Amino acid sequence: MITKKITVIPGDGIGPEVTSSAIRVLDEVASSCGCRFEYQEVPAGGVAIDTCGKALPEETLEAAKASDAVLLGAVGGPKWDGLSGDNRPEAALLGLRKGLGLYANLRLAVLFPQLKDASPLKNELVENGVDIMIVRELTGGIYFGERGLAPSDGTLENGTAKGLEAFDVERYSEAEIDRILKVGFTLAMQRKKNLIVVDKANILETSRLWRKRTAEISKEYPEVSVEFMYVDNASMQLLRRPSSMDVIVTSNMFGDILSDEAGMITGSIGMLPSASLGDPGKPGMYEPVHGSAPDIAGKDMANPLATILSCAMMLRSSLGLPEAADKVEQAVRNVLAAGYRTADIAQGSEEVLGTKAMTEKVLKELRKL
């Protein structure tokens, strides 16, 4: 029997609830595919600050490095809002990404047919379904560039003193761009063979380098059609023609914004899974997009489906179990088709379930497959 090691980081807020649900689903699917999952639970985020004094204890990172995959719940909450940037719970995310060499964030925005009425878009815009893979560069760009805050002795055109000046530098190397583009092209080959590169090449030098590298890398993937799109136009096209979009690859900041927009198109951020990947053979990190939602923590109200679908991505991309991934996704589809909803995706006429009850429905469907 194959054994796979999974590091579990429940984190803060609803994180422990949704990761607990996901583990039950993983154990259920494991029994039908001749494998076994071995879990090691470790702290990160706000709970780690409270118990260990730092957002990412060294033991947590070492456990993650030694695993086949990492399952993360969520980090952060108002309790820690007063801390400085390097000491905030979110620093754990940056530390994990850097420590594991995770440079590609995959956010899958799928509008299930059963949830089309939950989308804010008109039915005619989403009646053919939405299935968009957003590939976000994760370790470069403005989020990791030089930054600072300093007084300025300059003035505005009318003579007003500028006062403090802040700056954040956007940098990208050819190597960073090439590796994320190859992830995008590879995914496009596995899907509809359409790739949109989102940038701001009419203004930014970094974006112009992205276009140059795309032109070069595209020679290795002649079957993939490539479209360039300015980020402001991309944000509009996501609302105008989401069904026509397949794979989007873009920089760290642009991907951060567009993936959240795509999430709203699908009806609820509570349905969005994500994966953060590095080089082949290295452990990937899988987490729901929704965050820690401290206002509903402990109330059995959280939607576990994003975390469960993140596990499907884990089964497929890091654990080499694509058939198990298919079963998990089909179980979720079956539950939605049967009319079951959590509060965030309910439209009024369906049966609304809590976290535990929704998990039980998914488990029941898995047993039928």
Image (cartoon, rainbow, N blue to C red):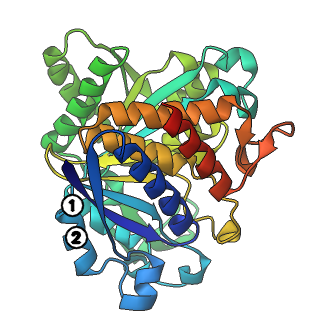
Marks 1,2: beta carbons within 8 A: yes
**Residue 119 x %, y %:** 70, 32
Report x, y in % for residue 295: 70, 69
Give the residue displayed 45% in from the left and 68% down from the top. Answer: 10
Helix, strand or loop for disc 1: loop
Q: Position of residue 257 (x, y in %)?
A: 51, 45
Q: Which residue is mark 2?
A: 63
Camera-nearest residue between 241 and 35 = 35
Mark 2: which secondary structure?
Answer: helix
Local crowd size for mark 1, using a 10 Å CA cut-off: few (<14), some (14–19), many (≥20) = some
Residue pushed farthest top?
223
Q: Which mark is residue 292?
A: none
Q: In this view of the protein, can residue 200 be seen by the observer?
A: no
Among the 4 quarters of the image, the one containing residue 127: top right
Label 2 amino acid?
Ala
Question: Which residue, given by chain and number where applicable, does mark 1 sit on?
Answer: 67
The answer to whether residue 51 shows anywhere in this view is: yes
Looking at the picture, tell me which residue is in the foreground, 340 or 241: 340
